[in-house]
Amino acid sequence: MKDRNSIISEVLSLLNISERVNKIFVEDVPSPWDEKAFIKRKKGYLEVKLRLWEDSSFLYGRIYRLFLYIYDVLREDFHYDPSKSPDEEKEPRLKDRHNQIWSIYVDSRLERRGIENFFDRITRKNIFVDSEKELSWEEASLIFQELWNKEDYTYPEITEITYNLSAFAEKNTEANRDKTECLVNNLLSHKGVIKQIERLPSTNLRNCLNDLLSFTAYKCKDTYIGANYYGIYMTYNKKLFVEIIPAEDNTIFLTIIDPFTNKTVSIIVNENTDMKIIQEKIFTIYKMMAQE
């Protein structure tokens, strides 16, 4: 595994900001939640202080994400102007939302670039949904997905969304609420589905299953997701292609069925399972059926 200095040099080069960062100081912190990048402007360059978790887990992604903030600050077309954002003392709630939206922008880019990151989509979504307590879980989840899917932001746009989240929500979710691929809230209001999810004691695993169902509802148009006495099932054009059985011992028995050959792939899902691989398998079968 590369050491910190090697990773820092590589990321600076990839982001093409090596010549604009003169000095870098690293301070160890006890948790990834304490990580942060600080900048000090000098004439023609920046001095950077990284507060970095001392553990090596996701080290490349964690360093990359910190420098993405600095990259944004240096981009002229990002129009960085902290004087326009909420005041931390006067508007702490809005300042937190502003920071979260920028973090969503950073972390979604890491996912698109295929870089493993401690703050992945599930973690970032849970943080956002938990912070927006005045919204229902379904509304906050839909807004998060719209924020995550937006591929480019400017600093003024982040500030505008921060102050007018309800307008952003109305524009980006209400218009899509009747589209099958966006009916995540209808899916999760299905009492049978919720009952099956709640069989899992682990909050993390429940969130993983919620995300898998949300992904399917969003990406696999016209897929029906329902529940019966033993679990959750997915059908497309009345063809069964996924069965999910949540168990009380914090495992999920998931079966993907190829309706053309009746061959099945069975997977035991736990908190360490890579859900992206399962999403890809489900989406692959769905595309085959949709093209039939």
Image: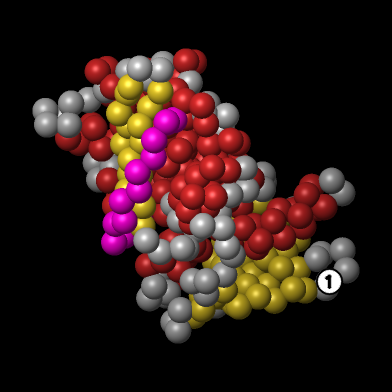
Residue 11 is left or right of residue 284, and the answer is left
Up the image or down, 93 lies above or below 258; here it is above
Would you name the residue on which mark 1 appears?
262
Q: Nearer the viewer, residue 128 or 133?
A: 128
| Residue shown at the point (38%, 76%) measured from the top left | 201
| Residue shown at the point (37%, 61%) measured from the top left | 54
| Residue shown at the point (88%, 68%) measured from the top left | 261
Residue 48 is left or right of residue 87, and the answer is right
Q: Is residue 101 shown to the viewer in this render? A: no
Residue 277 lies, in percent from the top left, at: 66, 61
Residue 128 magenta-highlighted: no
Up the image or down, 41 lies above or below 187; here it is above
Residue 84 lies, in percent from the top left, at: 27, 17
Q: Nearer the viewer, residue 119 or 180?
A: 119
- Residue with the most extreme left position: 90
Q: Nearer the viewer, residue 140 or 112?
A: 112
Q: Is residue 207 shown to the viewer in this render? A: yes
The three-letter code of the residue at mark 1 reads: Asn
